[in-house]
Image: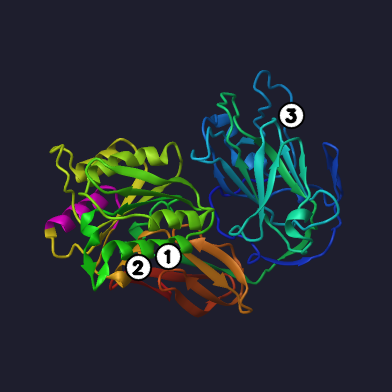
Amino acid sequence: MKARAHVGWIVGGLLLATLVASIAGILAAQSATYSGVTFPIGDRAFADRVAEYVAASCVRDAFDDAEEALGPPDATRDGCQGCGGCDTHAVSLGFRLSTIDARGVLTLEFVDNVLIDGQGADVFVYNTNDRPCEVAISVDGFEWISLGTTTGYPGAIDIGPYVGGSGTQYRFVRLTDVPADEDHSACPGASIDAVGVMGPAEAIAFDTAGGSLKVEAVGQLALMFEGGAAQRLLIVLDHTSSMSELVDGEVKIDIAKDVIIDLVDDLAVGSSVGLREFAGCGHTSLLVPMEPLYDKAGFQAKVASLTTYGATPIAFTLQQIPGDFGTLAGTKLVLLVTDGMETCREEPDLDPVDVAEKLLSDGYDLRINVVGFDVGRVSEARDQLMQIAQATGGAYFEASNREELRQALSLSAPFSYSVYDANGTLVHSGRLGDAGPPSLPTGTYRVVINASPPIVLENVVVSNQQTTLVSVEQQNGGITAHVGP
């Protein structure tokens, strides 16, 4: 197993900013053979870093270390009596009973080699049990090409039929569990020991003249990202009768749907996102389960389908949220968009602020950001919504028209930033609240904060052995960014 890497979604972390790399064919490295497959570039052929790991159901602690999938195969494949192919040198994806359950996902990145289409099989997945997994590849961790499913030790895949011999270099391989019958083995779902590729190695030379670039939230905005960016986002949308009222000549629900559809466009592919709606006392439903966002069009169609009716059951809706996240780990963010306060009183003791406080006291690791849309004239509604956000350490935003709602949503959801070098090449992407990018060669960069509208900082200088700070903060209902503290 290779050295431990940071586990968590790292958008587009290609590490090209850290390395001055050029394709050099097969380097002076000894070949290595594992289970009958010879890799000409040796152990350099195997994955170097975990970009994302989300276990589906029932994975035991002994089999949930994603970093066991790094480096060359090292499963013992013995001494595991009665545990159905499990090995503590592999990581389990878990299992799902249906496609609507949470998916098990493992995304691996190759740093010192690349995957290209060559002769014969190109990707080798070393799976210690007989459970299948879906395989996909990506250049940048955003857009994916599906390669179907595989099993075996190793399962071999020729990417040629899927990429058409384009010569494109791929750095990410994503493995996803396949829904199956209930599985109570120690390592349910595919058990991944290693993933190797037949692409060339890269000559790596560290640039001794380099500095670093840090993009961080400051001021009130920083409170939203304490403990890192949320890894799971649940959008909760009010489409009650009052959302049929007009704002600046437009129907409120139409504005909200348009802005949320645009927000989904800005979220990274593969982000874990769900959608819950509420309208009418005692009624709320999870329209889109909490799962990696691969079908943006489908998600947006669910938003567009909503019509207005009924009263506002905020407390009842908040009570359902723990079930939406299930056993998913990591920081969870709820984005509640509503135009009013609780109006359902079938249970007089059910207060939405009390419900929000109880979620935290019960141990749920979540934060609720609230956007009050057109509530400025009703101080009681504003106070209640602010208290819901404050009860969970979230933020409250107010919007009275389309543009203000757009700004509020761009602030209240985890937004990303991109870093480009002087040639316009993307060298790093991240989300506010993530760990910063790796070291960069000295030079001038363009930093784009992907809010709405985007904020572009030109000529950001990274100096030798210096850290350049880009500060992002909330100001006048929107966000600003500047170089320096």
Residue, disc 3:
76
Which label sits in the foreground, 3 or 1? 1
State which tag comes first along the sequence, 2 or 3.
Answer: 3
Question: In the picture provided, is 122 more to the left or to the right than 216?
Answer: right
The stretch of residues the image draws in magenta is 380-395
Question: In the picture provided, is 140 more to the left or to the right than 197?
Answer: left
In this view, which residue lies farthest toward the top? 82
Q: Could you tell me residue 384's position as x and y percent?
A: 18, 52
Instruction: Depth check: give the residue in front, 320 or 252.
Output: 252
Report the quarter where the C terminus lies. Answer: bottom left
Q: Secondary structure at mark 2?
A: helix
Question: Residue drawn at (23%, 46%), measured in percent from left and top?
Answer: 280
Can residue 406 be seen here? The reply is: yes
State which tag comes first along the sequence, 3 or 1.
Answer: 3
Q: Could you tell me residue 80's position as x and y percent?
A: 68, 22
Which label sits in the foreground, 2 or 1? 1
Report the quarter where the N terminus lies. Answer: top right
| 2 and 1 marks in contact (CB < 8 Å) | yes
Residue, disc 1:
262
State which tag comes first along the sequence, 2 or 1.
Answer: 1
Residue, disc 2:
406
